[in-house]
Amino acid sequence: MTLSLGWISAVFTGFFSAHVLQKLCFPYFWRDLVFLLRVVRYGVKLELFKLKSRVCTVLDRFIQQAQRIPDKPFVIYEGTAHTYRDVDRRSNRFAQVFLDDVKLKKGECVALLMSNEPDFLCAWFGLVKVGCSVAFLNTNIKSKSLLHCFNCCGAKTLIVGSDLVDTLDGILTTLLDDNIQVWAVRSHSEHTQVNTLLDKVDTASDEPVPAELRVTTSLKSPTLYIFTSGTTGLPKAAVITQLQSLKAAAGFWAFGVTEDDVMYVPLPLYHSAASLIGIGGTIELGATCILKKKFSASQFWNDCRKHNVTVFQYIGELCRYLCNQPKTDQDKVHKVKMGVGNGLRPDVWREFQSRFGNIKMCEVYGSTEGNLCFMNHMGKIGTVGRSNFIYRLLFKYDLVKYDMVKDEPVKDHHGFCQRVEKGATGLLLSKVSATSPFFGYAGSKQLTEKKLMRNVFVKGDAYFNTGDLMSEDQDGFICFRDRVGDTFRWKGENVATTEVTEILGQVDFLQEANVYGVEVPGHEGRAGMASIILRPSFTFDGKKLFDHVTRELPAYARPIFIRIQEVMEMTSTFKQQKFQLVQSGFDPSTISDPLFVLDAQQQSYIPLTDTIHQSIVSGNRKL
């Protein structure tokens, strides 16, 4: 008896000691293990597709859900519920029209230019049902960029939303001359050369088209092209394969979201966050999605209460807009338990949770075209993800030293990159391998190659260059620090400085322009600023510049500030020097060069005075 009690005591002491040791030395062990097991489980499922003759795509999963839960609301839009059966049958109608009237063939690429609405999904699914890949076009892009997008993905057909037909004025003739057929999602068209879809969809059969049209045998086959701004200027068509779309669709599931949850998607569907994670994740679970045409800070919480929303998607700006709304006694009256997104600043994060309740904010890090993803399943404030030795075995990445002044990685005497110490900031690189492939961009091997760094640590290796400066602390939590190169983020969009520079170069009084982003207190990302040199014998014309950028650039890409310099500083490799300009900001009290600010009311660039600067810094002046 004494011996038995001794053994029991020893076992109990052992377990207790192990528990204390685990809590002290490995406090995140069990939560990491549960999360990683989910990730590995889904990864095994994807690997099994390679052994089969067919891949179960996101669309296949949607059709399964339409058969399993036909009457469950899939999308609720402007108060109207569209069930899984509704969307399945309507997308069948679109598919029938695409085959019989548009004469599409399996393997073709079709461009989709539509705002958020249920027919965006029906057209998208209908195209995939007939075996076409789809290029999502940003509804903000202007004429030159729009034409460039067709050249990238090779699309010869454009599906345009009813509310966006007029945006084609000025390029419609060029599209038709290039043998691109244009179909509008409307019943009647004032343009004789713009075909109409809805009159044909309304009379089409809702029977499914032959399933063999959508059959996919490879995870590497392209299903979407999503355009992303980058360091090369004009939008680049990131290739989204079946593998990437399936991985993204598992995002909500990996965070523990279930089919009983209600998702709120206020982000544009042409972005990968809304389409791949938001809609794809809803389909994977068989949940319900509240789709907004545009985000509205004033309507957000009323929508959440009305529809019993439990999970919402965000970008950092979105949460700041919500925090800037007038406080009410209803701020914590809702069922929202989780937010999934990226770019949430720590101070906004704290304010958001303090005001609206203990909502778990799950940051997701990863570019549209990238081969690496971090997920903050812990919800720790200020971090975009978490890593550990198991994660590093599955996903090979490194942080390397980066020289901000020279704008390039630091190399050793052998010409290889140098890893940073724990806690230090470095450029994030992700190794390209069979398990983490990089599919690049459509239409340009040169652009794809430009995103790769070769011979990083040894001869022959290849890494995807994220262009992001990150740090990883002693506990494995990863923080985003900044972007390098020629891209910055403003109003939730990537701004390509080279594209903006090219547009500014069209103004007659500008000789040279250097575009960069500057931090503005109280704002996410960086506001656009351009350092310019005037042509000899020309003077600065704020009204002319305002009219030009308003006409040629989307709102988020227009420079907010202008700085007039006499000489443009260059790096040793003859690149425009941005680092010192970024550091000096837009403060007229410390900058002797003439400064101007975009003024929407006066429709001009006006002198940036100390008073205006103070109103911007204090948040009283809207940018």
Image (spheres, rainbow, N blue to C red):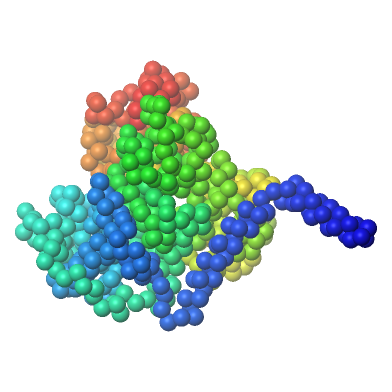
Q: Residue at x 58, y 57 (%)?
A: 35
Residue 37: percent from left, percent from top: 59, 62
Q: Residue at x 39, y 17 (%)?
A: 611
Residue 149 left/right relative to 435: left
Q: Residue at x 52, y 38 (%)?
A: 358
Q: Outermost residue, right direction?
A: 2
Residue 607 left/right relative to 175: right
Q: In the image shown, does 389 or 231 lie closer to the viewer? A: 389
Q: In the image shown, does 341 or 104 lie closer to the viewer? A: 341
| Quadrant holding the C terminus | top left
Residue 544: percent from left, percent from top: 23, 33
Residue 510 visible within the image: yes
Q: In the image shown, does 292 or 371 lie closer to the viewer? A: 292
Q: Is residue 127 positioned above or below 518 on the image?
A: below
Q: Outermost residue, front direction?
A: 1
Q: Residue at x 43, y 24 (%)?
A: 617
Residue 361 left/right relative to 102: right
Residue 498 visible within the image: no
